[in-house]
Image (tube, helix red, strand yellow):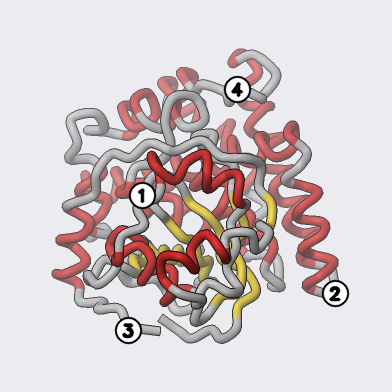
Amino acid sequence: MRERETGRETQREREADAETQGEGEAGPMQETQPALIFFLSVIRGTFFFSIGINFPYCLEVSNDHFDFSDAFTQGYEEVSQKFTSIRRVRGDNYCALRATLFQAMSQPAALPSWLQDPELTLLPEKLISKYNWIKQWKLGLKFKGKNEDLVDKIKESLTLLRKKWAGLAEMRTAEARQVACDELFMNEEEEYSLYEAIKFLMLNRAIELYDDKENGKEVPFFSVLLFARDTSNDPGQLLRNHLNQVGHTGGLEQVEMFLLAYAVRHTIQVYRLSKYSTEEFITVYPTDPPMDWPVVTLIAEDDRHYNIPVRVCEETSL
């Protein structure tokens, strides 16, 4: 696998170029069948032997969502050196959250320390009592309840996130954990509740970073860009114009992928197929992650929709 340049200035340029991206529509999250082999073998030979995407799906979206250029196919060829199949992720504007959280929760690892913090479930009441504008929070489409119950709803979501992640962490085998994670993400009520928890954690991190910046403390460069946008000059605007739209009318923008990484304290490594042969082909969020952060890996075919590579053949450090 090619090495990724990790120079600070180079990555800052990448962050500065982050653009608003929506998300495409796709089917439910499922491991794909190797029906794409013949379809792509006509174009690039047989190097896609172990990578498959549901054939009807490719027929439906190939013209609009897939660019079978040399860059695209060469990007998949390189991904296939380390991964043997792809898990499709439903593209309903929760795509980035779904792919990242699924990867993080399905990994055979202990419960993250930040989820063990007893103060975690007290966070909604603490923040909402301090920042009244958080009451403008827009609950997800699948989330029942009114905003009058916002504190309780977010608390329930955070409690569920801790409970489900802890249950997965206790499983002895990777196979059992994978099956349980599949079942969790097929339960819409619980799945969408988890996304409310993650969005709230993203807002909490945004508030912390904004306050640090205002107090003259050093902050990650992405947070400077995050609050330099006309639509998110402060955390309140970030909530109203961006986080409230996730799951409704839009997904996460590139710069918000950094915020997601900080919220779940995982390094997010993305193979951006459209950027093959450039230094942006493998993009890492955040730029200089702490050494103890676990890594999740995603594939972005057009910077709008994320899929999950599975069955790792060989893994190396960043």
Give SS at disc 1.
loop
Residue at figure coordinates x 41%, y 54% from the top left: 301
Say if mark 2 contacts mark 4, CB within 8 Å: no
N-term mark: 4 or 1: 4
Q: Please tell me the numbered disc located at residue 3.
A: 3
Mark 4, residues whose alpha carbon is within 10 Å: few (<14), some, or many (≥20)? few
Residue 4 screen position, x and y as percent? 30, 78
Left or right of residue 253, residue 51 in this image: right
Point out the image quarter for the N terminus: bottom left
Report the amino acid beneath label 2: Arg
Residue 261 screen position, x and y as percent? 45, 57
N-term mark: 3 or 4: 3
Residue 260 screen position, x and y as percent? 45, 51
N-term mark: 1 or 3: 3
Say if mark 3 contacts mark 4, CB within 8 Å: no
Report the amino acid beneath label 1: Asp
Report the amino acid beneath label 4: Leu
Q: Please tell me the numbered disc located at residue 172.
A: 2
What is the C-alpha distance between the residues marked 2 and 3?
33 Å
Give SS at disc 3.
loop
What is the C-alpha distance between the residues marked 1 and 3?
21 Å
What is the C-alpha distance between the residues marked 4 and 1?
23 Å
Residue at figure coordinates x 18%, y 30% from the top left: 230
Residue 71 screen position, x and y as percent? 29, 65
Residue ID for mark 1? 303
Mark 3, residues whose alpha carbon is within 10 Å: few (<14), some, or many (≥20)? few
Which quadrant would residue 160 be assigned to in this image? top right
Residue at figure coordinates x 35%, y 62% from the top left: 72
What is the C-alpha distance between the residues marked 3 and 4?
40 Å
Residue ID for mark 4? 141
- The mark closer to the camera, 1 or 2, is 1
